[in-house]
Amino acid sequence: DKNTVPDKENVTERKQDLSTKKTTELSPATNQQPVKAAPQVYQKVEHSKVPAPVQQEIAKKHKGSKISTASVNSAGIYKVELIGADKTQRTIYVDKNGKEIKDDLKQ
């Protein structure tokens, strides 16, 4: 009957059910796959097109190294393959302002 007042235990159970239900609905799904970053696409550029700050960073941190190849992605990150004076090869990643992001030394 609509006019009947539910007992206290029944009301408590309903509150717990609702709180559990809300929590479950707000929780992220556990069966979702993690989002993978899109692969970076680099476009080759001529050595003369590499910005001065990038060239200065190379000259300062990698003395005697020569640019083998250079390419840039849409975010302005330069991927530069260097050959050192000792013939050591390495790939460095430098932003357009000359800040080195990563150095992958190849043995």
Image (tube, helix red, strand yellow):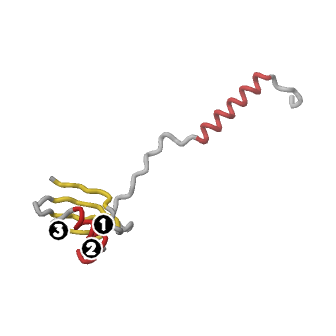
Which quadrant does the N terminus fall into? top right
First in sequence: mark 1 vs mark 2: 2
35 to the left or right of 43: right
Where residue 50 appears, as percent x and y from the top left, is 28, 73
Q: Amino acid at mark 2?
A: Val
Where residue 104 appears, as percent x and y from the top left, is 24, 55
First in sequence: mark 1 vs mark 3: 3
Where residue 105 appears, as percent x and y from the top left, is 20, 55
Q: Which one is in front in this view, the residue at disc 1 or the one at disc 3? A: 3
Which residue: 85% across, 26% down?
A: 5
Q: Is residue 102 above or below residue 74?
A: above
The residues bearing labels 3 and 2 have C-alpha atoms spaced at a distance of: 15 Å
How many residues crowd around disc 2 within 10 Å: few (fewer than 14), some, or many (20 or more)?
Answer: some
Which residue: 30% across, 66% down?
A: 78
**Label 1, on which residue?**
78
Q: Is residue 38 above or below residue 48?
A: above
Q: Nearer the viewer, residue 43 or 9?
A: 43
**Label 2, on which residue?**
45
**Label 3, on which residue?**
66
Q: Amino acid at mark 3?
A: Lys
Q: Nearer the viewer, residue 92 or 13?
A: 92
SS of the residue at dot 1? strand
51 to the left or right of 4: left
Which residue: 74% across, 26% down?
A: 12
Which residue: 49% across, 39% down?
A: 30
Q: Which one is in front in this view, the residue at disc 1 or the one at disc 2? A: 1
The residues bearing labels 1 and 2 have C-alpha atoms spaced at a distance of: 9 Å
Q: Is residue 27 above or below residue 10?
A: below
SS of the residue at dot 3? strand
Image quarter for residue 93?
Answer: bottom left
| Residue contact between numbered discs 1 and 2, judged by CB atoms under 8 Å | yes
